[in-house]
Image (cartoon, rainbow, N blue to C red):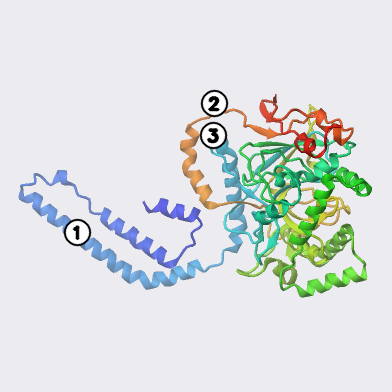
C-alpha cells in the first residue's frame, strides 16, 4: 500500500526528507509485524468453545508483542537511521543526472506523443514550450520535467518564406526584477478611446501593419496556416504583420488568447515586403490608418521605454555609445547591442540559473555571462530602452526558412518542435510597427536577416559551446516544461480514456480567413475581391470562417 504513495510523491516532485523516510520505515515495519499474525478463525473451532477463546487470547497477545517489538526496534534504530539517512540523502548524485534526464525525457516524450493516439484525441497534453522551458515571462526555469522531440506546431505557407518566420506567443511589457509582465490592457483601452479606431480597438491596432501595407494595393499578402498540436493553448501563435479576425481576443496590445480551434489561417505580409511598402508611405499624405499608427507610436514610447533600477553602469555605456557613435536608427542600435552581447557573453544552452530572489538579467550581465535566448533577449530589451526605443520581450517560435519543404500541392510545410521555441526582443519603429530583433548568437548569421537553423542535436548536454557565426544550431536546450501534476493526472487517466476509443472523432474546426485572390489595385477597391462578411466555405475537410479584411477598410476607406 505504501509503494503507490511513494511513487506518486516522487512523480509530483516531492523532495526526500529524513523524518518522512523514518515514518515510512516505521509504518512498513508495523504493517509487516501485523501481517505476521493472521487470524485463522476457520481453524479455531466454534465460538462457544474453550479452544476458540484460547486462540483469540493468544492472537491478541501476539499483536501486542509485535507492536511493542516494532516500536522498540524503531526507537533503537532511530538515531543510527537518522545519521545514515542524512549521509545517504546528502550524497551528490550529479553524475547520474544527465542519464536520468535523458531516460525521463524520452519516456515522457513518448507518453505525450502516444496518449492522444490511444485515447482518440481525448487526452492531449499541452506542453508549455517557450524558450528554454521558460513559459511566459519567467526568466528562471521552474519546476517540471523536460521533454524533447515533441511536435508543437505545424505550419503550411502559400509561398516559400524568404526569412525566419517568428510566431509571437507571450509578450512582456514591464519587468518587475524577476519576471516580464504582460502589457496593461486597461491602460491600452483607455488610451485607444481617443484614436477613432471604430469597433474593436485591440484588433484594429493589432492588424494595423497589415492594413497599412495593403492600403496602396501593390503588395500581395501570403497565407500561413498554424496548426497547434502540443503547443500551449494559452496563446494564439501568429506571424508579424498578420490580419486578425473579429473572433480573436487580444490582451490589450499584447498577446492573443488561445482559441478552441486547432488551426488558424492568417493573411500576412513578410517583414521585408511590409517594410518596403511602409517606407514608401512615409512621404505620402497621411491617411486615417497613418494617424492611428502615429497615436499608437506615441503610446508605445510612453509605455515601453522604462528601464529597471540598478543598471547604472550599463546605462552609462549606452549613453556613451549613443553619443560617440551617433546611434539614432533602430538598425544601427540593434547592431551595436548585438555586437556587445555576442562579444562579452557566451551562448550556453545549460546556463546556470541565478540564486533564488536574484535579478536574472543582472545575474546574466554581471556574474554568469552565459545564457540562451531568454537571457540575450531580456538584456537586449533593457538596452534598447536605454537608447530610448520602445522595446518588449517576446516568447514564441522561430521557424527558419530552411525548415520549409514544398508539398505536392505547391504549398510549403514545416514542423516546429520544442527546440524551435524561442525568445527575442521586438522594437517599435515609428511608421512600421513592432519589429523582431534577433540577439541570440546561435540564431544570427546575416545582418538584419535572422536565420535560426535548429538541428535535432542532443538536448541535455552539460555545456553547449556557442556556435560560430553562420553555423546552424539548436535554438534552445531541451526545453519544453510539462508540469508534474499534469503528467501524473495523465498517467492516472490514460488507460480509462484510451479505452473509450476514437468513435466519432473528426477533424478539428479551423478558424481563419479565406485565402482567396486579393487583387490589389487601390484601397478603395480592396473590399471587392474579398468574401462577404460571415461567409463560410469548406476546405480540406474543415470549415473556415471568413472574417473579411474589408470590415475595417469599408469603414475607414469609403467606396470610390
Secondary element at image label 2: loop
Asked if residue 347 can be seen in this view, the reply is: no
User: Residue 224: percent from the left, percent from the top?
Assistant: 76, 37
Q: Give the residue pinned by disc 3.
A: 118
Question: Do the residues bearing badges 3 and 1 touch, measured as CB atoms within 8 Å?
Answer: no
Secondary element at image label 3: helix
Name the residue rendered at 24%, 65% in the picture: 68
Name the residue rendered at 87%, 45% in the picture: 272
Q: Earlier in the sequence, mark 1 or mark 2?
A: 1
Name the residue rendered at 60%, 63% in the picture: 94
User: Residue 533: percent from the left, percent from the top?
Assistant: 72, 30
Asked if residue 556 can be seen in this view, the reply is: yes
Q: Which of the two discs, 3 and 1, sits closer to the camera?
A: 3
Q: Is residue 511 above or below residue 484?
A: above
Quadrant of the image for the C terminus?
A: top right
Q: Earlier in the sequence, mark 2 or mark 3?
A: 3
Q: Which of the two discs, 1 and 2, sits closer to the camera?
A: 2
Mark 1 and mark 2: Cα distance apart in space: 60 Å
Q: Give the residue pinned by disc 2.
A: 504
Mark 3 and mark 1: Cα distance apart in space: 51 Å
User: Residue 435: percent from the left, percent from the top?
Assistant: 81, 52
Q: Residue 62 shows which numbered tag?
A: 1
**Quarter holding residue 263:** top right
Secondary element at image label 1: helix
Q: Is residue 554 above or below residue 468?
A: above
Q: Residues within 10 Å of mark 2 (few under 14, many from 20)?
A: few
Q: Nearer the viewer, residue 1 or 132?
A: 132
Amino acid at each position: 500500500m505504501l509503494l503507490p504513495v511513494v511513487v506518486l510523491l516522487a512523480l509530483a516532485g516531492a523532495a526526500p526528507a529524513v523524518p518522512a523516510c523514518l515514518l515510512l520505515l516505521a509504518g512498513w515495519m508495523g504493517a509487516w509485524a501485523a501481517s505476521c499474525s493472521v487470524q485463522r478463525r476457520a481453524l479455531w473451532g466454534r465460538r462457544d468453545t474453550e479452544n476458540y477463546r484460547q486462540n483469540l487470547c493468544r492472537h491478541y497477545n501476539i499483536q501486542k508483542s509485535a507492536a511493542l517489538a516494532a516500536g522498540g526496534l524503531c526507537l533503537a534504530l532511530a538515531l543510527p537511521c537518522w545519521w545514515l539517512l542524512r549521509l545517504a540523502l546528502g550524497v551528490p548524485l550529479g553524475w547520474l543526472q544527465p542519464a536520468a534526464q535523458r531516460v525521463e525525457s524520452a519516456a515522457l516524450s513518448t507518453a505525450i506523443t502516444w496518449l492522444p493516439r490511444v485515447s482518440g484525441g481525448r487526452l492531449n497534453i499541452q506542453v508549455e514550450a517557450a524558450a528554454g522551458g521558460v513559459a511566459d515571462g519567467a526568466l528562471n526555469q521552474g519546476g517540471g520535467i523536460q521533454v524533447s522531440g515533441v511536435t508543437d506546431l505545424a505550419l503550411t505557407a502559400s509561398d516559400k518564406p524568404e526569412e525566419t518566420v517568428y510566431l509571437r506567443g507571450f509578450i512582456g511589457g514591464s519587468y518587475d526584477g524577476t519576471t516580464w509582465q504582460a502589457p496593461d490592457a486597461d491602460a491600452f483601452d483607455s488610451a485607444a478611446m481617443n484614436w477613432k479606431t471604430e469597433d474593436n480597438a485591440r484588433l484594429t491596432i493589432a492588424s494595423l501593419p497589415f492594413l497599412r501595407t495593403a492600403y496602396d494595393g501593390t503588395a500581395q499578402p501570403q497565407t500561413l496556416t498554424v496548426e497547434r498540436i502540443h503547443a500551449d493553448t494559452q496563446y494564439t501563435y501568429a506571424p508579424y504583420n498578420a490580419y486578425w479576425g473579429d473572433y480573436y481576443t487580444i490582451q490589450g496590445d499584447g498577446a492573443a488568447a488561445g482559441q478552441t480551434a486547432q488551426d488558424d489561417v492568417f493573411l500576412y505580409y513578410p517583414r521585408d515586403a511590409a517594410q518596403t511598402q511602409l517606407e514608401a508611405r512615409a512621404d505620402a499624405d497621411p491617411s486615417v490608418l497613418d494617424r492611428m499608427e502615429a497615436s499608437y507610436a506615441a503610446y508605445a514610447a510612453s509605455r515601453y521605454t522604462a528601464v529597471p533600477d540598478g543598471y547604472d553602469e550599463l546605462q552609462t555605456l549606452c549613453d556613451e555609445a549613443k553619443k560617440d557613435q551617433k546611434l539614432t536608427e533602430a538598425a544601427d542600435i540593434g547592431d551595436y547591442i548585438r555586437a556587445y552581447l555576442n562579444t562579452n557573453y557566451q551562448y550556453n544552452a545549460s546556463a546556470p540559473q541565478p540564486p533564488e530572489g536574484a535579478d536574472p538579467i543582472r545575474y546574466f550581465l554581471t556574474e554568469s555571462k552565459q545564457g540562451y535566448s531568454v537571457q540575450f533577449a531580456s538584456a537586449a530589451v533593457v538596452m534598447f530602452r536605454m537608447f530610448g526605443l520602445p522595446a518588449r520581450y517576446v516568447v514564441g517560435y522561430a521557424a527558419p526558412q530552411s525548415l520549409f519543404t514544398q508539398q505536392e500541392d505547391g504549398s510549403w510545410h514545416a514542423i516546429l518542435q520544442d527546440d524551435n521555441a524561442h525568445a527575442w526582443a521586438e522594437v517599435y519603429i515609428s511608421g512600421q510597427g513592432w519589429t523582431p530583433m534577433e540577439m541570440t548568437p546561435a540564431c544570427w548569421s546575416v545582418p538584419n536577416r535572422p536565420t535560426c537553423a535548429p538541428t535535432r542535436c542532443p538536448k541535455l548536454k552539460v555545456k553547449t559551446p556557442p556556435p560560430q557565426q553562420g553555423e546552424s544550431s539548436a535554438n534552445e536546450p531541451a526545453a519544453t516544461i510539462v508540469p508534474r501534476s499534469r503528467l501524473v493526472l495523465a498517467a492516472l487517466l490514460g488507460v480509462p480514456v484510451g479505452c473509450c476509443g476514437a468513435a466519432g472523432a473528426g477533424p478539428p474546426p479551423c478558424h481563419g480567413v479565406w485565402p482567396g485572390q486579393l487583387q490589389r489595385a487601390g484601397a478603395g477597391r480592396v473590399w471587392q475581391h474579398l468574401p462577404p462578411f460571415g461567409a463560410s466555405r469548406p476546405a480540406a475537410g474543415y470549415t473556415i470562417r471568413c472574417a473579411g479584411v474589408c470590415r475595417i477598410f469599408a469603414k475607414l476607406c469609403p467606396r470610390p
